[in-house]
Image (cartoon, helix red, strand yellow):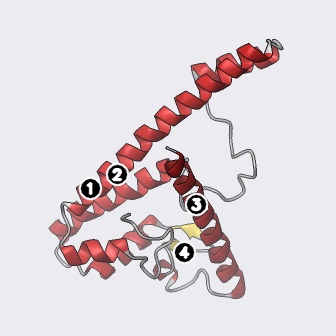
Amino acid sequence: MNILKKTLILAGCVSALGLGCSDLMAQVGGGGGAGAGRRGGRAGGGAFNPQAMLDTYRRALGVTDDTEWSAISAKITAVTEARTAAMGGRGAGGCRGSGAGGGAAAAQTDAEAALQKAVDDKAPSAEIKTKIAAVRAERQTKQAAVQAAYVKAQDELRALLTARQEAILTLPIQGVFGGPLLQ
């Protein structure tokens, strides 16, 4: 489980670094305007453009048949959404401006609410530690489920691809933000 945590932290750092590079390119004159869709699915001042990203994948995979593309693009979308969830909701553009505490507060789970109540009530350390452990266990369970969904989405996409297409999606594609789609 520790290696999963390290992998997720590394993925978040790589994503944050990629966002910074994209923003820098835009400031230097590389972003926006014609052709922005070829640079990471980001168009118009750095906004994430999912259609441009899908168009880049389609060109890279060499899919010309619309029916085939419809099936593949749905699975690509599922993988990117699962990857975003696995990264804690910080997909393309999701980290921007969130700061150390993250964006808007998410709804508390029961375990988090119990921990908050223990903190507010100035409960004994032993009780607080028990509640902390419950929050961590709940988060680990949720993260394991999210990671399993991500792996499943990748497997479903792989089932539709040729070996060459799978290889293309296993490598970084120039113009697609976030690194390789398949792990």
- Closer mark to the observer between disc 4 and disc 1: 1
Quick one: label 4 or label 1, which is nearer the N terminus? 4
Question: Does the CB distance between marks 1 and 2 fall below 8 Å?
Answer: yes
x, y percentage for residue 2?
54, 46
Give me the C-alpha separation between circle 4 and circle 1: 30 Å
Assess disc 3: are there few (<14), some (14-19) or many (≥20) residues with their C-alpha within 10 Å of its C-alpha. Answer: few
| Mark 1 secondary-structure assignment | helix
Viewer-nearest of labels 3 and 1?
3
Q: On residue 72, which mark appears?
A: none
Residues packed near mark 1 inside 10 Å, few (<14), some (14 to 19) or many (20 plus): some
Task: Kindly check if marks 3 and 4 are in contact, taking CB atoms under 8 A apart as contact.
Answer: no
CA gap between label 2 and label 3 equals: 17 Å
Rendering coords of residue 27 (x, y %): 71, 81
Which of the 4 image quarters holds residue 97?
bottom right
Check disc 3 and report the residue beneath it.
10
Judging by the rendered image, the residue that carries numbered circle 4 is: 43
Give the class, few, some or many, for how many residues have Cα within 10 Å of label 2's Cα (few <14, many ≥20). some
Q: Which residue is mark 1?
A: 155
Q: How far separated are the C-alphas under marks 3 and 4?
A: 26 Å
